[in-house]
Amino acid sequence: MEFNRLGWQDQDRKFGQFLPILFLAFILGILAAVFPWWFVLAFCFLIFFGIVSWFAPVFSVIFVLALQFGVLSKIIPRIPLGGGGLNPEDLAVPILLLIYAIKNYGSLIAKLDPLVKYIKPLSLFLVCAVISAVVALVYKTAPTKDVLNEIRPFFTWLLFPLLCLAIDNERRLSFFLKALFILSTVIAVGMLVQSFTGYQIFEKGQEVRDLYTLGGSTRGVKRSETAGQFLMAGALVFIFSQYAFGRMNKFLVALIATPILVGGIAVGFGRGLWLSVLLSIFILGFYAKPVNYIKFAIFACVVFVLSATAVSAYKPDYVEAVIARFTSVAEEVDSGSSLGRRKEENLYALERVYDNPILGVGLGGQFKPFGRESLTWENESRYIHNSYVRIVAKLGVPGLLTAIWLVCVFWLRTYRIFRDNSVDPAIGFTCFWIIVTTTLLTAATQPNLAAQNGVATIVIALFVAERLRHEKCHGKMSRV
């Protein structure tokens, strides 16, 4: 009897192990009979993604960031919804946040410590955005799809608590930083391929197109764009910082990655980003030891010369285009058509603010009449390039004041962490540089505080800086 009883128990246990599989097969069968194939495929992927996310949080976070910066957009398309589409990362972030909130239920407050210093200004900033969206939807001041498109970047701030819960120890932070560096290099490779071949790899950002400088096109040169431009530039500044602070211990990796990152930044032909990277070299001179800085300067010069030589042999027009683009800054300021359009849209936006300083035009609202660009660019009457003009025009003066408060906290926190002797200076400087670049140096021409890629990059920099301060892993984290 004992043998039979144990035998039946073994059989019951084996049958019980198959019950979840049978249940899943039953659910999939029903879904396949009712819904289209892509829905069943998406459901299966969500189950797999949830399992991987539970046991390997760094992989899931890097996957979401790759989606966020447009690296996987060709492979994983938007999810059809109500005649429009839902970006996979918009769905993945709240799902992951829920998974890690459940996983870390007993230690949520402790895990969210890096977010504490930003709660007040960030909460008020997001409240302004929500009020603007609600007013626009209730009073129908703008089409619903336009309101939802402009509120989406504000939900990107959910990445902050997600990173806090997912990257919760020194080992995961080290792996996360290495994965970020690899992702940045992949983005740079994609930028080069886009520019040299004309084939669009990244879905986010404008299409690959001819380069125009001062209204004239450059023959044979394609301008490539990516949502991961700041991430790519941050990886390059990180290498520079390692040299300047005497912490370079992966010379071969740096030697291979630096020309790729330089090339990826160059073919974006973004003068603001170029100047920001050059400014980082200048600023490093104030904090690095003279001997280390000289070594870094020699390395940078050698890499730049070798990269220019290689490109001039393969694509000589690109070297001429970079020089022409860089030397045209003064003329662009005086009489450039691109800057002229920016000034025009700023004047229109400020007029709307004067009409309604409390709410502005609201999220999704038009601030100027349709122009000739509206024929090829639908958002021309709603899109404002300047970060702060965009915020005050869309959220009103209260939104601008909370944004300025938030940015001041960003600067103060990241600079203090950079100057903390217990924090790796190479990573600390990179985080501080990203904040300065996104909120000041390029903010006049890019709406970084109201764009998904800008917010995502800012969140990464803030999280890494705060986690460094928390872990106090001096001298360990800068190893690529």
Image (cartoon, helix red, strand yellow):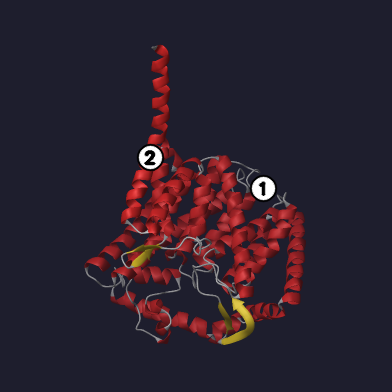
Q: Are marks 2 and 1 in contact (CB under 8 Å)?
A: no
Give x and y (percent) for residue 243.
Answer: 71, 55
Residue 140 in which image quadrant: bottom left
Instruction: Please report the residue visible at 48 percent of the width from the left and 54 percent of the height from the top.
Output: 64
Instruction: Please report the residue visible at 77 percent of the width from the left and 58 percent of the height from the top.
Output: 295
Q: Nearer the viewer, residue 420 or 69?
A: 69
Q: Amino acid at mark 2?
A: Leu
Give the left or right position of residue 292, taking residue 342 as reference.
right
The mark that comes first in sequence, 2 or 1, is 2
Give the left or right position of residue 86, taking residue 58 as reference.
left
Give x and y (percent) for residue 98.
Answer: 38, 45
Q: Look at the picture and state if 272 lies above or below 212.
A: above
Q: Look at the picture and state if 311 lies above or below 300.
A: below
Q: Amino acid at mark 1?
A: Arg
Q: Is residue 106 visible?
A: no
- Residue highlighted by disc 1: 479
Q: Which mark identifies residue 352?
A: none
- Residue highlighted by disc 2: 22
